Every structure is written in structure tokens, then in C-alpha cells.
Amino acid sequence: MPIPTPADRLPAQMAFLTEADKLKSVIRANVISDGSRFENTAEHSWHLCLWAVIFADQSNGANIPRVIQMLLLHDLVEIDAGDHPIHLAHDETAVQTAERKAADRLFALLPADQTVAFRTLWDEFEAGKSTDAQFARMIDKAAPMFLELANPVLGPAERDILHSIQTTGRFAHLKNDWPELYDVAAAMLNRRTPVMSDTFAARLRFVMEADTLKTVLRGTPLCDGSRRENSGEHSWHIMLWALTLAEHSHVPIRLDIVLMMLLLHDLVEIDAGDNPIHGDYDQAAVEAQEQAAADRLFGMLPANQRDELRAIWEDFEAVKTNESIYAKSLDRAQPLVCNLESGGGSWNDYNVTREQLQTRVGDKVLRGAPAVWGYLAPLIDTWFTANR
């Protein structure tokens, strides 16, 4: 019997990552901060990871890299089971049964060892007993409340719901677990001027400003072709790619650093916008815009976090370390699958040739994740043969 190779695992891993794309179409009950639309679960998961990093000092010693992995996975079951708003009545037992069934199906798409590893993280989050899970769940309670409080058209009915969630619902637990955040939310909900430390205020402004990334549209469509992907949900998806495909990096890498890079890498698009790789634009001008955006956005944070996170972003941009080479390769690879699944996507929009795709994308994927390119290249060749 042939000995399995890492490449033998890629079909299962890619099936999982493609199925995960459906989380971008699961709509939640809370709005994004500008009130323009309801949030989806993929971008929600990305935003929670950012909250966990920014407010890590509230974690009671949790392992933040594990918390991030947990938050990447925690709501995947909503692909099958849907979202269940906490202010609406539902059969808790039936929901738990549906979610366990979804976890069985989704994680079973992966190779056996990853099925166990990912399911273990998901089960740990659900149980909510470990320090890591408790912090992850605390963040999961906090972020949606502040998105709703930021809603510029928050009405009386929505305000009543928030009062209920805060006083007797799951947010009420934060009165003891995270009193400063609870008091700020209570003041905002009751139209009082909140009192907070300068450090807390800076961090809160940053995570709320980061929410704007969910409104930045990319050139790439979702896998089902229903709409264009936004940069918030894209960031979640490639973090999941990095977690799932780490064994295929060109060299061993520090996964926690890669996940941090991908968490932050597109934040500058809040100011600079997305510039599709197949588009026509002034690269020097774009880089200047992105540097200015990084100055503004990371500059919102307290000095120690400003410098640490800016350095991680700069590392990704420079593409000189093993971690940034792998991270950049996945940033190029994920849109390939979206385009293949959607019938061509941005390749059709920009009339991309196979040769252009190789030089602009393929060579970069090959550099950081050669096995991934080896898997995708024949699929790409087949598509271009049939469509060009």
C-alpha cells in the first residue's frame, strides 16, 4: 500500500475550506456598526479574533493563540444549524442537537487527525469551562452589544432588547467578569456619557473602527457567486486556510504569527480600499495610501499595542520572513478557489489569461505553499482550457 503524502490530504482540506465559505451567507441578528446591514457569521468571527487580541489583558491568563483558533471555528456549525438570536425563544436542546450534528458533518470533511483537533476546540468552546473558552465566550458576548450600540438608527424596540440582554440576558454576566466594559455599555444604552480609562477608550475606538472593514468589497466573489466578498470575511477565511493548511507551508512556521498577520493584513483597506491584483493601478500610490492608513489605524491604539501590531503588519507587507511568505501565499490562493467555484469570478471581470495568473498569483503561492499550488494548478489549467 502506498504511503500517504501531505498532498493526499489536500482534497479533504480543500473540501472543508470551500464548504466553510458558506458561513459568509449566514446572517446574524445584530447589525454592523454603521447600521447599514446585518452582520454575517464569518465577518463576526474575524472581528471577535481582533477583540480577543486587543483586550487580551482581560483574559485571566488565557492562551490567546488558542482563543483565536477557537473563535475561527466556534460558529462554523451555523452553516447547517443557522444563527439563533439570544433574544428570541427557541428549543435549546433542539439547537444543541442540530449544532452537534453540524459539527459531526463539517469537521468530518477533514483528515482524521484534524477532525479530532478542530472538533476538540469546538467542544471546548461549547462547554465554556476552560480559561480559554471562558475568554472566547466573553468576547462573543461583548462585541455584538457594542455593534448594536453604535447603530446610528437604533430604535426603541432594539433598545428594549438590549436592555433585556444587559440586565438579565447573557451580557449580564459581564457585570462581574468585565465591569469596565459593562459599565460603558450601560452608560451608552442609557444615553449617559461613559466613564472609561484612556487605554480602554483607545482600544474600543480601534475595534469599532476596524468594523468598517466589513464594508470594503473585494474583486473576488463568494464561492456561490452570489455577491462580492468583503475584506472582513476574507480575513476570517484565510485565517482558517492558514490553520488548516499549515502543514503545507514551504518550511515550518509559527502559526500564531501567521494568524496575527492575516487578522491584521487588510485593515488598511478601511482607508485605502481594495486593489484587485488583476486591476490597473499605481502601485506606489497604493503603498503610500496604505502606509498612511496604517499610521492612522494603528495609531489609535496605546503605544505598546500600536508598535507591536504595526510591526506584524509591516512584516506581512515585506514578505521576507517564513511566516509572511506563507501568509502571503494563502492570501493569493484563497481567491483562486472562489473563482473556480463561481465559474471564473474576477478572471472573467478582468479578462485574465493563464500566463497572467501564473506571474501575478501562481508564483507567489508556489513560493510559500508549493503543495497547495500543485493541487490547484491542474484545476486552473482545466478551467482556462475550457473557457479561454
Image (cartoon, rainbow, N blue to C red):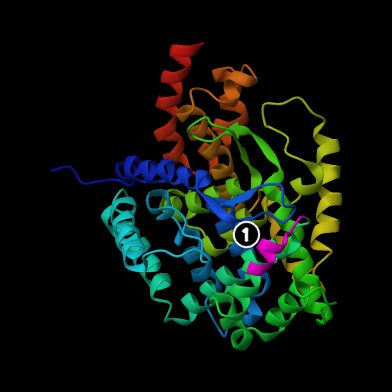
Give the quadrant of residue 157.
bottom right
Q: Is residue 346 visible?
A: yes
Residue most toward the bottom? 176
Question: Where in the figure is residue 381, as x and y percent of width and height?
Answer: 44, 20
Which residue is located at x 32 percent, y 62 percent? Answer: 94
Query: Is residue 123 shown above or below 220?
Result: below
Q: Is residue 59 visible?
A: no
Q: Which residues are magenta?
A: 153-160
Left-right relation of 145 to 287: left
Question: Is 236 or 261 nearer to us in this picture?
Answer: 236
Question: Where in the figure is residue 375, as x and y percent of width and height?
Answer: 39, 34
**Quadrant location of the N terminus in the rendered image:** top left
Label 1: state its secondary structure: helix
Q: Is residue 155 magenta?
A: yes
Which residue is located at x 74 percent, y 58 percent? Answer: 151
User: Which three-letter amino acid code belongs to the residue tagged 1?
Assistant: His
Within-10-Å neighbours for mark 1: few <14, some 14–19, many 20+: many
Q: Is residue 228 magenta?
A: no
Which residue is located at x 71 percent, y 42 percent? Answer: 216
Give the quadrant of residue 175.
bottom right
Query: Is residue 14 shown above or below 115?
Result: above
- Per the picture, the main secondary structure of the magenta-coloured stretch is helix
- Which residue is disc 1 drawn over? 47
Question: Where in the figure is residue 72, as x and y percent of width and height?
Answer: 50, 59
Question: Is 146 or 192 nearer to us in this picture?
Answer: 192
Question: Is 92 or 222 nearer to us in this picture?
Answer: 92
Give the quadrant of residue 15.
top left
